[in-house]
């Protein structure tokens, strides 16, 4: 793990566990996210990544453990904690019959952004996400890549400190993938990001640190620069640790 003092953590999860019908799918997971860091979350199907993300976003309560977003306990004060959090699930929560502007105004209202600055927030968010010329277009007629950008826009319109992205480049063509990766790099200049993906090259391209889960446990947590210094290939590490 990269060296950060405690005051620089935007997200801290301690000893998270979650069981279904007595079987643990996430067991004793502890992780921290440093300010300005992009953390790659990897693992095979069934490793517990989705359950972990659902707990980190407040969509699922852990059986045990503690989560803080910018020092605010997510379980004790979810409204305040979630104000610092943005989330893009694998299937973006979009209304296809709305225009981009209509949808972002709606999301801004959900986040209780002051009515006086909603228009400004929408314009700023569109510019940030490469949607400046798309405001009057129906979301349903946009390309997959642009819909993903709208999905990110809804996650960042309230300027959160932490963004959690689940498979943000799935289904995109190579040009769209390149554009999405650049957008994520730009977002990381002002917030911390957890990026869940099955694409190892995406983690190597974007992330400062990689965390690998297998069978509900964290089996690897290290800065990518440390792997590079050792001359170790991420694919080799992933294969060795997830075939156990």
Image: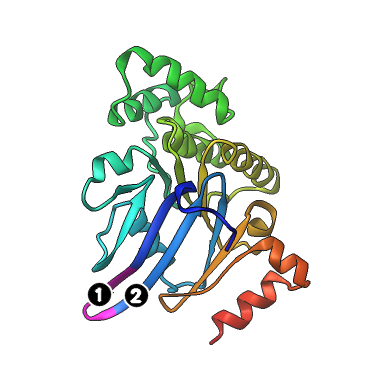
Q: How crowded is mark 1: few (under 14 residues within 10 Å), some or many (20 or more)?
A: few
**Quarter location, residue 87:** top left
Tag 1 secondary structure = strand
Residue at image coords 51%, 40%:
191
Residue at image coords 48%, 23%:
137
Q: Is residue 188 left or right of residue 31?
A: right
Q: Quadrant of the N terminus?
A: bottom right
With respect to residue 76, does 222 lie above or below? below
Q: Where is residue 238 in the image (x, y as percent from the top left)?
A: 61, 75
With respect to residue 152, does 42 lie above or below? below
Residue at image coords 42%, 25%:
99
Whether pointer 2 and pointer 1 mark residues with C-beta atoms closer than 8 Å, the reply is: yes
Q: Can residue 170 be seen in this view?
A: no
Q: Position of residue 67 (x, y in %)?
A: 33, 56
With respect to residue 134, does 57 lie above or below? below
Indicate whether residue 12 is drawn in magenta.
no
Q: Is residue 188 visible?
A: yes
Q: Is residue 203 left or right of residue 41?
A: right
Q: Earlier in the sequence, mark 2 or mark 1?
A: 1
Residue at image coords 42%, 35%:
154
Q: Label 2 to label 1, Cα distance in Å?
A: 7 Å
Q: Where is residue 172 in the image (x, y as percent from the top left)?
A: 60, 48
Which range is magenta? Answer: 16-23
Magenta: main secondary structure equals: strand
Q: Position of residue 31 (x, y in %)?
A: 45, 62
- Hey, which residue is sitting farthest bottom in the picture? 244
With respect to residue 85, does 44 lie above or below? below
Tag 2 secondary structure = strand
In the rendering, which numbered label is found on residue 25?
2
Q: Is residue 72 left or right of residue 92?
A: left
In the rendering, which numbered label is found on residue 20?
1
Q: Which of 73 and 126 is in front in this view?
A: 73
């Amino acid at each position: 793990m990269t060296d950060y003092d405690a005051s620089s953590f935007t997200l801290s999860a301690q000893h998270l566990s979650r069981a279904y019908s007595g079987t643990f799918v996430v067991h004793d997971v502890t992780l921290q996210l440093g300010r300005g860091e992009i953390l790659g979350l990897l693992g095979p199907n069934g490793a517990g990544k989705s359950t972990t993300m659902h707990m980190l976003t407040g969509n699922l309560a852990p059986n045990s453990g503690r989560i803080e977003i910018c020092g605010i306990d997510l379980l004790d004060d979810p409204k305040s904690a979630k104000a610092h959090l943005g989330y893009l699930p694998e299937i973006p929560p979009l209304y296809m019959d709305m225009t981009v502007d209509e949808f972002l105004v709606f999301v801004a209202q959900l986040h209780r952004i002051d009515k006086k600055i909603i228009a400004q927030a929408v314009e700023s968010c569109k510019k940030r996400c490469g949607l400046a010329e798309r405001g009057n277009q129906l979301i349903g007629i946009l390309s997959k890549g642009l819909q993903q950008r709208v999905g990110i826009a809804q996650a960042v319109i309230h300027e959160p400190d932490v963004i959690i992205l689940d498979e943000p480049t799935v289904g995109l063509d190579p040009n769209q993938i390149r554009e999405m990766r650049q957008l994520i790099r730009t977002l990381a200049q002002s917030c911390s990001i957890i990026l869940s993906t099955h694409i190892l090259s995406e983690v190597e391209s974007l992330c400062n640190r990689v965390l690998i889960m297998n069978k509900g446990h964290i089996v690897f947590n290290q800065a990518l620069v440390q792997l590079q210094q050792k001359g170790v290939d991420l694919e080799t590490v992933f294969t060795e640790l997830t075939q156990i």
